[in-house]
Image (tube, rainbow, N blue to C red):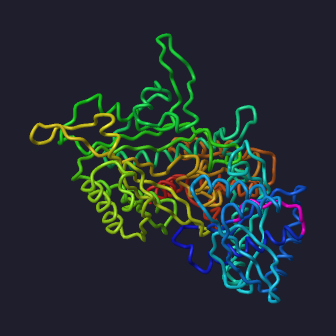
Amino acid sequence: MSKLDKSSHLYQLRHSCSHALAQAVLQMFPEAKLAIGPPIEKGFYYDFDLPRPLIPEDLAILEKKMKEIIHEKQTFVRREESIGKALEVLKKANQPYKVDLVEGWKKDGSTSVSFYENVDRHGTVKFVDLCEGNHVENMGEIKAVKLLHTAGAYWRGDEKNPMLQRIYGTCFETKEELNTYLQQLEEAKKRDHKILGKQLELFAHSALVGGGLPLFLPKGTQLRENLMNFITKEKKARGYKFVTIPHIAKDELYMRSGHLGKYDAMMPIMETEDGDRLVMKAMNCPHHFELYKAQAHSYRSLPLRYAENTVVYRNEKSGEINGLLRVRALTQDDTHHFVRYNQIASEIDMILGLMQKVYARFGFTKYRARVSTRDLNNPDKYFGTDEVWNMAEKNLIEGVQRWGAEYFIGEGEAAFYGPKIDIMVEDALGREWQLTTVQMDFIQPKNFELTYTNEEGKDEYVAVLHVAIYGSFERFMAIIIEQFGGAFPSWLAPVQAKLLPVSDAFLEYAHTIREILENNDIRIEVDDANDTLGKKIRNAELQKVPYMLVIGQKEMDEQKIAVRDYATKKQEVMSVMEFVEKIKAEAEA
């Protein structure tokens, strides 16, 4: 949850639920070791070191115990202790993960910590936890709680540390809100891109290739190509210049940019006979900066927009890899905008307009922006003058205001080299995804000497905007698979239509139609299996093909096709060229 939400009642409810969960776990496993249990965007979790693996039946038992604890209406009482006393108490209680936390705070200079006691109506302390707050007045305020599932989690997210068992739960103000959320979770399971990716024959994984390295099957490759063609066409219409860069570079390039050492994937993969160490790229901007420097630029040539669809490599932790959402080789629709400072506002308008068109194409109509700005109390953290920062922040804020979307300020969340805009979109299930980032950059133009000649013949530094509309093709694919539930609109679908001859007698006519459709750039397949029409329709529906083209005696005699719509289940008869025009109209809509 956002820091802005910490004082909200929902935050307090969920935080209180994590305490109730920990208390329930200790009742069931007195020897349990407690780690951390924060509220999160959609609920709460708590990490435990337990004497045995949890099974699904355990969640029902723990949830029952939680509800008994909640029914007691236990209150929260804060107690502050010195660091020394806290360590003594936690060591005596044999809680090593809490000890580890407190020792870390001690190294950071803290002299005291707070505990919260859960006290019942008789004044008996039922549970104590190391905690900063906030909570409800008493647990009786919790009206709608549900434990969801378990997962593994390394202590402090480090694979070298012990693997803990994480219990996820959720809590809402009312049972109605909880039931709505649980229904959304059930729908989300049906739309899970990992399940649909296999069912729709989009992508696969290989243990021999490695985790986080998806392999795209022909239909998945076609879906990627459709996404790529769409964004490329939109960018070219706005004057972007497409470039191509290699996937490796000398480590000196990333020393200059400051990236070397910050990305584990950027390890030397070879050394040339001249002694140059070559590394895999984890980002594209340094290559694009060198492309900019390869030519002279005047004020007349700006803004200049470089675009590329290219792979970068990240050494993600194994436990964080998730289908297409988190991978080690990701393809970015990356762009870098080289602009004069007085062009920042108009460039922001152009970028936000492009984003709006892209989002609408995929059915994303609800979105909001976060503008990340400086921490004014720590000005030394940031590169550049106050004048430049004030101008940049003003341009970004006014840009999202002109755009008209809801926005909020993330004070102190800017990078040291410039403020940024992050766009969060809401999908068909009400989930929010961060998609596009527009990052201002003041430092790299100076690191790489990125200049242009102004009207007076003098060199000036450009400003750079880093933008990727999709973010990455892999992650965006995962999001839209779940957005559409795999039932893509015809312009996007890997296979737009499937020909279903009623029997082998109509196969020749079916292949004649296939050739006509292919010659008109329609993505078409023929089901020539020796199955009944009913089974062919079911198979096509499992593949969520937008249109099924049924061919029988009547259709062949009339030189037409019976078009069955997957979405509406309605069927109409039309000529082949009428169907071609229908598909083309949908693509242009």
Q: x, y (%) of residue 188?
A: 69, 64
Would you say residue 173 is visible in this rendering? yes
In percent of the image, x 36 and y 62: which residue is there? 376
Identify whether 441 is placed above or below 59. Answer: above
Look at the image and say whether residue 33 sits in the magenta stretch: yes
Determine if the magenta segment contains residue 111: no
Q: Closest to the observer: 338 or 470? A: 338
In this view, the residue in front, 370 or 473, is 370
Give the quadrant of the C terminus. bottom left
Quadrant hosting residue 389: bottom left
Say which residue appears at 40% left-offset and 56% top-offset.
420
Toward the viewer: 248 or 516? 248
Left or right, 319 with reference to 415: right
Rendered location of residue 167, percent (x, y) = 77, 63
Residue 124 at x, y percent in the picture: 82, 83
Q: Find residue 562 and report its horizontal and vertical position in percent.
A: 64, 59
In the rendered image, the residue lying farthest to the bottom is: 121
Q: Which residues are magenta?
A: 28-37
Q: Image point 74% across, 86% down: which residue? A: 140
Which residue is found at the position 82% from the left and 80% from the top?
69
Q: Main secondary structure of the magenta part?
A: loop
Locate the N terminus and report the quarter of the image it occupies: bottom right
Can residue 552 be seen here?
A: no
Left or right of 342, for residue 136: right
